[in-house]
Amino acid sequence: MILIDSIKIKADIKSDDDAILITTKKYNVKNARDIKIVKKSIDARKKDNIQYIFSIALNCDNEDILIKKNKNISKYEPLKYNIPSKVSKNHKVCIIGMGPAGLFCAYILAKSGVKVELIERGEDVDKRYEKMNNLFKKNILDTASNVQFGEGGAGTFSDGKLNTAVKDKEGRKDYVLDTFVRFGAYENILYDSKPHIGSDVLRTVIKNMRNELINLGVNIHFSTKFDSFTVIDKKVNSIECVDSYDATKRFTIDCDSLVLATGHSSRDTFEYLKDILPMEQKAFAIGYRVIHHQEFIDKAQYGNDYKEKYPSLPVSSYKLTYQTKEEGRGVYSFCMCPGGYVVNASSEEGRICVNGMSNQKRDSGYANSAIIVQFKESDYKTDDILEGMYLQRDIEEKTYKAGDGVIPVCNLSEYIKSYNSNRSSDNNSIDFSNTNEVNPNDAILGKWKYADLIGIYPKNIEDAFIEGMNHFDRVVDGFASSNPLIVGSELRSSSPVRILRDKSLEASVKGIYPCGEGAGYAGGIISAAMDGMKVAEAIINKIS
């Protein structure tokens, strides 16, 4: 098999099949077969000549000749992940959390013959979807089943982006993507440079994966909250669980290993573990969701006449980074959602946070992204391991109060007016309902209210946010000056703590494996799934 790399094709083609046809003709490929697109990206640096960049693998009759004639053609060996060998020893693993880390940890273990008990405090994805609609339409929050908790984890109701910067020599990333496709995702996620499933498709993928786990013998416990664990001879022995809706219903499950894949919003779990397992403070980021018209972003990326020149181009995204001049504090876009929505992502009463979500078609007409500011290790004022978590809670409470119990929003112009008033009574004269072209009813899933967002964050975070927005306006003309909608508050981009683990991926108590995003070892769907696989491999190696 050969790889034809860096194939530049004008972005006016109608389909990926056109790119394959153009490539085989251009290089005079003889009897092409087993054709596979390996990578596809967009080069939009020249608006008058936007191009797709393809890498295509295939078998053909003149491979050696093509390799000799073309510098961009070489032998190709696809990276393949090897499932660990079957385990003969009887060993039970309890996994806490059904996000990507927990699901893929369970999947690899079950395929290797390990008995798995999968514990999830939230509900299955369909019931969870109903609870979310109750929150979006009626502002009724279920603290056990919401955007953060439930089958599939927080990523199920996000943009569903599948890109990661994690280095992967073992083929775990490709295995995760292949698994998603096998369970219902579109094949283009295997090669798009910015792969994206979409929340609507991901729900189906998660259900299909659950059914396969059950077929493999995994016992799944929904609406079941992990409460504590017991230790015998310095090794985990069992866990205690409680019904998420009835605290009188408790039960114990014996286990030989315990995987803590709880996610970064399981704050009660952090509080329980605080004095039991070594943990450390870590940097995280906080900020707002910023909403523009999708067409504004598309024109900025592709040019004003892109619809006529390149009608098949997908909705565009952006990635922006900046470092403030005085403090050297990072400000950057995160989880950018083309054609998406801002959603109420709250999980605790009296507190509000938001996230971004999109469906597979990305057709809402609005683009939103978190514009977040780095909270560094040096910003911590105490040695309290959970100081960052407490800060998140305090900001979510202020956000809740600012919006009188619903999502607070305002336009950037009013935000800056309030900021310049130095939080004095002068901001009483500011009309926070001053509307622009962004209609919150179309761009936000959840009850909302025009409100003053100044004072929710510490002043140095507000300083950095505004400095960053001003810089981004110079990078993307109109990014700030077009007066986008600002939505509060974005706080769950990553975990504020890390549960320490050794080279065998175990915590200080043997048999306990901190895993995924909540434990501080991942930063998205793919990296969390890959970490779940790594933990499964570590458990299998130890058993073997």
Image: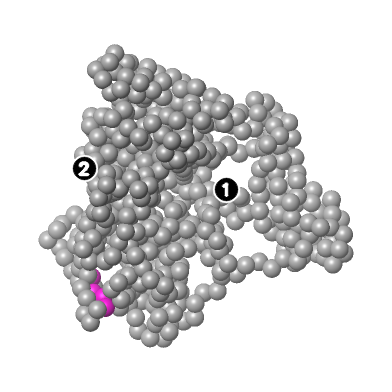
Question: With 428 as the anchor, is 531 left or right in this view?
Answer: right
What residue is at 29 percent from the left and 18 percent from the top?
427
Mark 1 — residue?
194
Determine the CA span between mark 1 and mark 2.
35 Å
| Amino acid type at image mark 1 | Lys
Query: Residue 267 location in percent, x, y?
Result: 26, 53
In which image quadrant can residue 206 be found?
bottom left
**Tag 2 or tag 1, which sits nearer the N-term?**
1
The quarter of the picture where the N terminus appears is bottom right
Query: Crowdedness of circle 2 by 10 Å Cα count: few (<14), some, many (20+)?
Result: some
Q: Give the range drawn in magenta.
A: 235-239
What residue is at 44 percent from the left and 64 percent from the top?
531
Mark 2 — residue?
349
Q: Can you say whether 30 is above or below 236 in the image?
A: above
> Is label 1 in a helix, a strand or a loop?
loop
Question: What secondary structure is the stretch in magenta mostly built from?
Answer: strand
